[in-house]
Amino acid sequence: MTKPVVTVVGLGPGGPEYVTDHTRAEIARVAARFLRTARHPSASLVPDATTFDEVYEQADTFDDVYAEITERLVAAATLHGEVLYAVPGSPLVLERTVRSLRADARVECRLHPAMSFLDLAWARLGVDPVEARVTLVDGHEFATAAAGLVGPLLVAHTHANWVLSDIKLAVEDATGDEPVVILQRLGTADEAVVHTTWADLDRTVEADHLTCVYVPSLGAPVGAELVRFHQLARTLREQCPWDQEQTHATLVRYLLEETYELVDALQALDPDDPATDEHLLEELGDVLYQIEFHATIAEQEGRFTMADVARNVHDKLVRRHPHVFGDVTAEDSDTVKANWDAIKREEKGRTSVFDGVAEAQPSLAYAEAVQRKAAKVGFDWPDVHGALPKIAEEAAELLDAAAGGDADHTADELGDLLFAVVNVARHLKVEPETALRAATRKFRTRFEAVEALARERDLDLHTAGLDALDALWDEVKRRG
C-alpha cells in the first residue's frame, strides 16, 4: 500500500528572487498546500495555503508546536494522498518539523533542495564556513549545543531578545567586549548587518524571526568550568601514579566517605547563614569528582564517557516525568511517585517489588526501603497503631532470647526489634537514619558537655563512677 506523501519545499532566505524554479513548479503541482508560517517574505508564492501560525500562539512549548504540525500534516496527507509543506529557507537546515516528518513511518517525506539563510550569511560575513570551521548552533539549545566551544559560531533560531539574553548568560566567563555580528532579514529590502559586543547582544536590536548571530570567538567556552574539570580528571588519570592505580572497586570507599561528608554538610546547612554554603560547595565538588573519576576510568576502557552518564540520566528523567514533558497529568507528588514507579518497572522488566533496592545502603535505610516497597503492594499495617505494639512484642522476645544464652538467637531478635522500630518510623514519616543520627549527635553533644563539666571540677570520668556521671548528665540536660 502506497504511503501518503508530504512534499517539502524551501522558500529560501528572503524575497521571491531566491526561490528556485523547481520549488515554484512543486508549489503549482500539489493542490493541498501548507505553510509553516506566513511570516516570510516569499510566503505569497504559496497561494491558498493553510498556515500554522496559530499553533505557535496556542502551544505551551516548541516541542508541542512541532508535534501538532506533524500530526496535522500527516492527517492532511492521509486525506489528500499528497500535500505540500513550505518552510522558510531550506528544509534541512534547523527545521524540526521536517525532522519529525522524516521520522514518521505513517508518511513518505519527499524533500526538495532550496537556498538557506546560511548562503547569504556567509556572503555578508565574507566567511568560508569550511575553512573557518564555523559551527552552526540552535539558539534554543545554545548552552548545551555549544558546550566546550569558543567559536566561530553561527547561532540561528534567535527570534526574540529573551533568546539572545539566554545565550549571553550561558557564557559566565565572557569579558563582554567580544565582537559579535547580528544579521537580520537577509535577502530582503531592509536587511541589516549590525556589529556589536557580547555585553550588548540582547540590547542592540529588536530580534525577529529572520535574525541570526555570528560569534567569531569567545574568551572562554560555553560550560567552561565543566569542560576544564573533565580535562583535569583525564590529566590526573594519565599522569598521577595514585590515580592511575585506582579501579572502580578501590574507589568505592572514597565514594562512601565523600557521600557521608556531603550528608554532614547538608545537615549543617543554615538557611540564615550563607557561610555554611562553603562547606556544602566543597563536599558537592568532592562527590562530583568521584563520579567524574569513575566515568574517566570507563572512558579509558572504551566502555562509556561522562557525556554518556549525563545523557543517560537526562533522558531517564525526561521519560519518568511525563507530566512535565508529555501529556500525562499529575496533580500531586503521590501521583508523580506512582507514575515514576510504573515507568521504572516497565523499563527494568522487574518481577519482584524488591528489585533495584540497594543492599549496600546503611541497614536502617535498607530496612525502610524494603518495608516501603512491600507496602506499595498492600503488605502493611493501616497506620502506626498497628506497627507500634510490635516493638513491645519484639523487645519481650529479645529478653527471652538473651536469657536463654543463645547468641545467634539474640542477634536475630535484636534485628527484629530494630526492624519493628524502623516500621514505626516509616508510619510516622520519620526517616530512621536521620532520626538516629540526630539522636546520636545529641548524645555526643551532651556527653562532650559532661566531659567539659568534669574537667572544670577536676573529675576523672574513668574513676568518677556511674552516679557521678548521671549527676553531671542531668545537670547538662537541665541546662538545655
Image: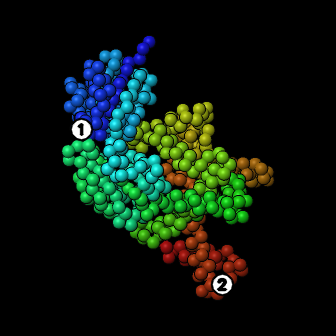
**What residue is drawn where x is 55% and y is 67%?**
442
Q: Which residue is mark 1?
A: 15
Nearest to N terminus: mark 2 or mark 1: 1
Q: On the rendered structure, is 143 left or right of 182?
A: right
| Disc number lying in front (2 or 1) | 1
In this view, the residue farthest toward the top is 1
Label 1 sits on a secondary structure element that is loop
Q: Which residue is drawn at the image coordinates 28% and 36% (left, top)? A: 18
Q: What residue appears at the point 20 percent right and 47 percent down from the top-left corner? A: 190
Snapshot quadrant of residue 289: bottom right
Relative image position of residue 283 (x, y in whole percent): 55, 64
Quarter the N terminus occupies: top left
* Three-letter amino acid code at the position of disc 1: Gly
Residue linked to disc 2: 459
- Residue 337 showing in the rendered view: no
In the image, is residue 1 above or below residue 392? above
Taking depth in this image into account, of 50 and 385 the one nearest to the observer is 50
Q: Nearer the viewer, residue 388 or 67?
A: 67
- For residue 240, above or below residue 403: below
In this rendering, the answer to whether 354 lies above or below 448 is: above
Count the marks. 2
Asked if residue 151 shows in the view, the reply is yes
Amino acid under label 2? Leu
- Depth check: give the residue in front, 34 or 178: 178
